[in-house]
Amino acid sequence: MEFGNALYLAEQINGSIVDWKFIEKQPPADPQLAEARLTRLEDAYGNIESYASDRGFDSAKTRAILEASGITNAICLRSVERLKDELEDENFCILQKRRAQTEGRIGIFKNAYLGKPLRSKGFANRKTRIEWCTLTHNLWKLARMAAQAKENQLAAAA
């Protein structure tokens, strides 16, 4: 929950925000939110390789959707016994480690982009602020990626 409303952020491996939803009323349960957002992500981007999230998003239905879609399931499992088994899978561990970076991204997004406290009043104004901050964040990420690529080129040429 953010600002009295729920904010869902999804990012790809390079840290760019690829999906978000700011929810005005009572948010759906995390598994239901994941199911809806997976459909949206597939419609927008096509094939999704993997989906990682915290254990709140784990459900039998979400696992079945991911399996049917051929998406690697890296959702942290609610069952401790099943989680122990998954932790033996190197790919699962890598994706969960990457997911942990999303928690940091949410903190950066809230504190560095939106401002603390968020001064926009009313849901519509907060939503607009989030839209602009998402765009700004992604432009910043693209600029950093371009600068890093240029630096790598120069280093390779030297």
Image: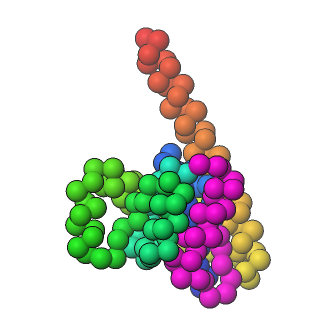
Residue 13 x %, y %: 48, 48
Question: Residue 108 magenta-drawn?
Answer: no
Question: How many numbered circles are shown?
Answer: 0
Q: Is residue 61 above or below residue 122?
A: above
Task: Residue at the far top: name it.
Answer: 158
The residue under the point 25% across, 60% down is 87
Residue 123 x %, y %: 72, 80
**Residue 104 can be seen, yes or no:** no
The residue under the point 60% across, 41% down is 142
Quadrant where the N terminus is found in the figure:
bottom right
Q: Nearer the viewer, residue 94 or 119?
A: 94
The residue under the point 69% across, 56% down is 43
Quadrant of the rendered structure where residue 145 is? Answer: top right
Left or right: residue 147 versus residue 132 is left
Q: Is residue 104 above or below residue 21?
A: above
Question: Residue 25 magenta-drawn?
Answer: yes
Task: Residue at the far front: name it.
Answer: 68
Task: Residue at the far bottom: name it.
Answer: 26
Left or right: residue 35 versus residue 157 is right
Q: Is residue 143 above or below residue 29?
A: above
The residue under the point 61% across, 66% down is 37
Q: Is residue 11 above or below residue 147?
A: below
Residue 94 x %, y %: 33, 51
Q: Nearer the viewer, residue 28 or 157?
A: 28
**Residue 52 can be seen, yes or no:** yes
Quadrant of the rendered structure where residue 100 is? Answer: bottom left
Residue 74 x %, y %: 40, 60
Quadrant where the C terminus is found in the figure:
top left
Q: Which residues are magenta?
A: 21-47
**Display colour scheme:** rainbow
